Amino acid sequence: MTIRLTPQAQEQAPPVRRAGLWWRWTRAVTLGEIAGFSVPAVVAALALGAGPLAQLAVILLAGIAEGAILGLAQAYALRTALPTIATRDWVRATAGGAAIAWTVGALPIMLGESLLRWPPAVLALLAMTLLAAMGLLQWRLLRQHARRAWWWVPATAGSWLAALAAFALVTSPLWQEGQPVFLVIAIGVLGGSVMAFTVAALTGAALVGLLARPGRAVPPTPTQVSGTR
């Protein structure tokens, strides 16, 4: 069977409304990440005092839940710009990336200070994996719809690095040993809110820049594909 694309299928995508897309993405992702991060923040506080394996299990499950909630929020924001990306696929990619990132992030719980004795190259690779996992899995979907989609991977990694730094700046001076659980949770949610806005704003700018590139392709619709047997 020979498949030919009609001329309409080879047209470029319509221009992206930059301000509208950035605001839609930033609002949705901020709220989605606040809601999503609240799950591991609450779970981690409640799991204090449990054994390392129990903490690891519940944190990983909570991290996957965070990724799924964040993925839903991002998919909602993408509907106007990339309606051909299925919500289910985007949520799976985001939750999968979150699972990888939380697995790496949970290593200190399991290994403690012994982790610091690992070779620096291995630690650097783990850090890169933590930051880039989500963007890498999402890139596999974006590459079908945007030229130079690989740029999404370093852009999201840098955004998460800045967001995690913002989270640490907020929570580190506030968290103290012996605090009641409700206060630990409140501080975590506060830091998560700052982290959420930071990553939402930065990834929103990256997405707008990516989709505003000239020559962005649009996958053909069924009516744009003709074939002969």
Image (spheres, rainbow, N blue to C red):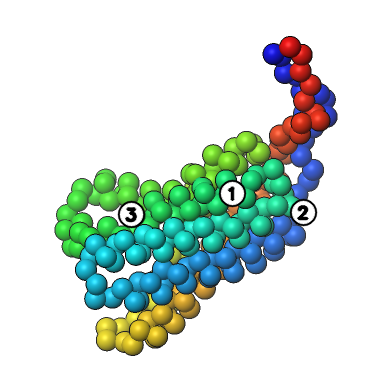
Residue drawn 20% across the image and 63% down it: 112
User: On the rendered image, what quadrant is the C terminus found in?
Assistant: top right
Residue drawn 78% across the image and 46% down it: 15
Classify residue 165 by image quadrant: bottom left
Residue drawn 63% across the image and 54% down it: 75
Q: Nearer the viewer, residue 171 or 180?
A: 180
How far apart, in angstroms, are the residues tagged by discs 1 and 3? Answer: 25 Å
Q: Nearer the viewer, residue 71 or 29?
A: 71
Residue drawn 59% across the image and 69% down it: 31
- SS at circle 2: loop
Tell me the mark number nearer the camera, choosing from 1 and 3: 1
- SS at circle 3: helix
Q: Position of residue 175 (x, y in %)?
A: 34, 81
Classify residue 55 by image quadrant: bottom left
Residue 88 is tagged as 1
Q: First in sequence, mark 3 or 2: give its number.
A: 2
Residue 104 is tagged as 3
Tell me the mark number nearer the camera, choosing from 3 and 2: 3
At label 2, the amino acid type is: Arg
Q: Position of residue 141 (x, y in %)?
A: 58, 41
How far apart, in angstroms, are the residues tagged by discs 2 and 1? Answer: 25 Å
Mark 2 — residue?
A: 17
At label 3, the amino acid type is: Val
Residue 198 visible in rendering: no
Residue 7 visible in rendering: yes
At label 1, the amino acid type is: Arg
Q: Nearer the viewer, residue 208 or 41?
A: 41
Q: Is residue 179 above or below residue 202?
A: below
- SS at circle 1: helix
All told, the count of numbered labels is 3
